Amino acid sequence: MAGVTAVGIKDARTFAMAFATSVTESTPEGESFVARNGKESLYTLMSTVFPPACQTDLKRHRYRSKIARAEFNKLVEASCGFKLARNRRKQLTSVAGTWLWCGRRLLDPAQPDDRAKLEREYDRLCSSFPPFATCPKDHFMSCLTELAASWLPRLEMPRRPAASLRSVPTDAAAVA
């Protein structure tokens, strides 16, 4: 991966929007979620797959040719139609915080249809952003596979049952 960090992208914002829409797809609202923050977020994925587009976390300098996490999140919300939803499921908040992208589904390379779509999107990103071609397709797919293997099972975990407000006795003997 030494060659990937040596190449930059002229317009990181345009690349970020294309990347976010390439690795996810729209679903009916409330049906699926994607991490907005944390180690399983789209920004973290993008910084792992193609670091030259991302601002470092050191915050000593601001590079115009790179995009920061907060800017990425604002951009995909405003320009790509990503919607926010508050979430309190512990299995999700422990790694992604309480705000998630709703109505978006992370494409899973383990699924044949998703893999074919991801391969087409990878080729589209390479043709639209030539420096991205320095990122090998195997690296792109393996990063997505790792994220999907970690994130998607969290969405399938059962929710904790809601606690009742109070216990109501069912027979008269219990009342007396």
Image: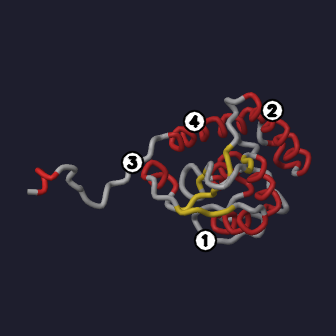
Give, as a three-letter code, the residue at label 3: Arg
Q: Give the numbered dot on residue 160.
A: 3
Give, as a three-letter code, the residue at label 4: Ala
Spatial distance from mark 4 to mark 2, Cα to Cα? 18 Å
Percent coordinates x, y for residue 120 in the rendering: 85, 38
The colour scheme of the drawn protein is secondary structure
Spatial distance from mark 1 to mark 4, Cα to Cα? 34 Å
Give, as a three-letter code, the residue at label 1: Arg
Q: Residue at x 53, y 63 (%)?
A: 86
Who comes first in sequence, dot 3 or dot 4? 4
Who comes first in sequence, dot 2 or dot 3? 2
Q: Which residue is mark 4?
A: 149
Say which element carries label 3: loop
Spatial distance from mark 1 to mark 2, Cα to Cα? 40 Å
Say which element carries label 1: loop
Residues at marks 1 and 4 touching, judged by CB atoms closer than 8 Å: no
Who comes first in sequence, dot 4 or dot 2? 2
Percent coordinates x, y for residue 166 in the rendering: 26, 59
Say which element carries label 4: helix
Q: Which residue is mark 2?
A: 116
Q: Residue at x 69, y 63 (%)?
A: 72
The quarter of the picture where residue 15 lies is bottom right
Viewer-nearest of discs 2 and 3: 3
Viewer-nearest of discs 3 and 4: 3
Spatial distance from mark 1 to mark 3, Cα to Cα? 43 Å
Say which element carries label 2: helix
Who comes first in sequence, dot 1 or dot 4? 1
Image position of 86 (left or right of 118): left
Spatial distance from mark 3 to mark 4, Cα to Cα? 22 Å
Image position of 174 (left or right of 51): left
In-front residue for pair 110/2:
110
Q: Which residue is mark 1?
A: 60
